[in-house]
Image (spheres, rainbow, N blue to C red):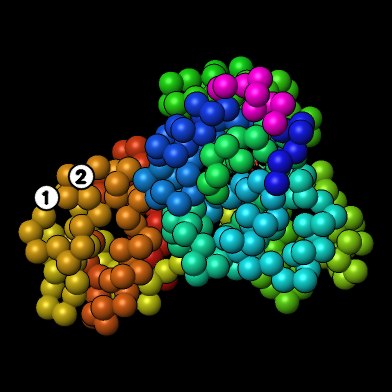
Amino acid sequence: MTDPHEDAWLAGRPDIVAAARILAGGGLVAFPTETVYGLGANARDDKAVARIFEAKGRPRFNPLIVHLPDAGAVAACAVLDARARRLAEAFWPGPLTMVLPRRPDSGLGLLVSAGLDTVGVRVPAHPLARALLRAAALPVAAPSANLSGTVSPTTAAHVREGLGSRVDWILEGGPCQVGLESTIVDLTTAQPVLLRPGAITREALAQALGEPVLHADAGDENAPRSPGRLLRHYAPTTPVRLNATEARPGEVLLGFGPVDGATLNLSPAGDLVEAAANLFAMLRALDHEGARGIAVSPVPAHGLGEALNDRLRRAAHS
Ligand code: TXA
Ligand code: MG
């Protein structure tokens, strides 16, 4: 499907084609949406997604939102039930993210979902974002294009100030209209749950659905509102032992760097981006070995190592 408005963007903007090529090649592209500027990478490529976390300096792997050009493209990645279809019709394209079950054949990497069986999906309304998504013809993972712990960028200049050369391309698209991240609603539960408030209100969602939408913190007034705290993160059922120098009898060894006897190795070369890209898939694979335990080599604490160690510690304590 083509839209004359987007075709005009494409015709006048050869930079969109260049940006789409960078995405396809595993690079990072900052692009405007109607909410905030996003830092995009190919959501099928775990290594490209790992570079997002590296560029933002995020201390942990939280799941990212996958951006798609239309509901049809969303349906190839996620399972849309009747409720999801209703919200898609009412609010897409627009500042609404839905958390839905991942399709087994989605082709998405595991890192974008932080190892979960669900995925956050959104169809942005900004014509430049839509043109980029069509030109790239890829699902694009994108958190806000700022350093972790700083305010979200609503102009290309903000992105340049914060991320500079950490991003391969910045698409200039003027100031963002909404200026606030998208509303996030979780539809993987019996009753819809609002995970993050945004321009599309809880009342508007409830009206479109014809049923109430719960607060994420329903039933507990003191519960933290941050959606990240509410996530059931993937954790192996096999016990995990950290900072291991070798496997004990019955254990499998998840190596990092040049270690001998690793069952799997996050990165034999000691590359943190490669290790982040492999983390969830390798934890899952080793969990299925039926071993007594998963021993994990030490991972350095700097850069992306902070997020890797955060996730490994959670796996070890569950
Ligand atoms: O407006 C926006 O949504 C912007 C623009 C760039 O589209 N993007 C954005 O992404 O705000 P980010 O990475 O800051 O928001 C991701 C949040 C996670 O922290 C989590 O709360 C929620 O979305 N999320 C994503 N996938 C999820 C999942 N599978 N389950 C639960 N929550 C999820
Ligand atoms: Mg953000």
Whether residues under marks 1 and 2 lie with C-beta atoms below 8 angstroms apart, the answer is yes
> Badge 1: how crowded within 10 Å, few (<14), some, or many (20+)?
few
Sequence order check, earlier mark of 1 and 2? 1
Name the residue carrying label 1.
258
Q: Amino acid at mark 1?
A: Pro
User: For the image shown, how many numbered marks are present on the structure?
Assistant: 2
Amino acid found under the numbered disc labelled 2:
Gly
Q: What predominant SS class does the magenta segment belong to?
A: helix
Above or below, 269 relative to 19: below
Q: Quadrant of residue 78?
A: bottom right
Q: Position of residue 11 (x, y in %)?
A: 65, 24
Percent x, y of residue 214: 79, 66
The spot of residue 222 in percent (x, y) is 71, 60
Q: Secondary structure at mark 2?
A: loop
Q: Going 92% across and 62% down the picture, which residue do you hit?
A: 207
Asked whether, in this view, residue 303 is left or right of residue 124, the answer is left
Q: Residue at x 50, y 70 (%)?
A: 104
Residue 190 counted in the magenta span? no
Front one among 311 and 37:
37
219 up-or-down from 30: above or below = below
Q: Which residue is mark 2?
A: 270
The magenta stretch is 7-15
Query: Element type at marker 1?
Result: loop
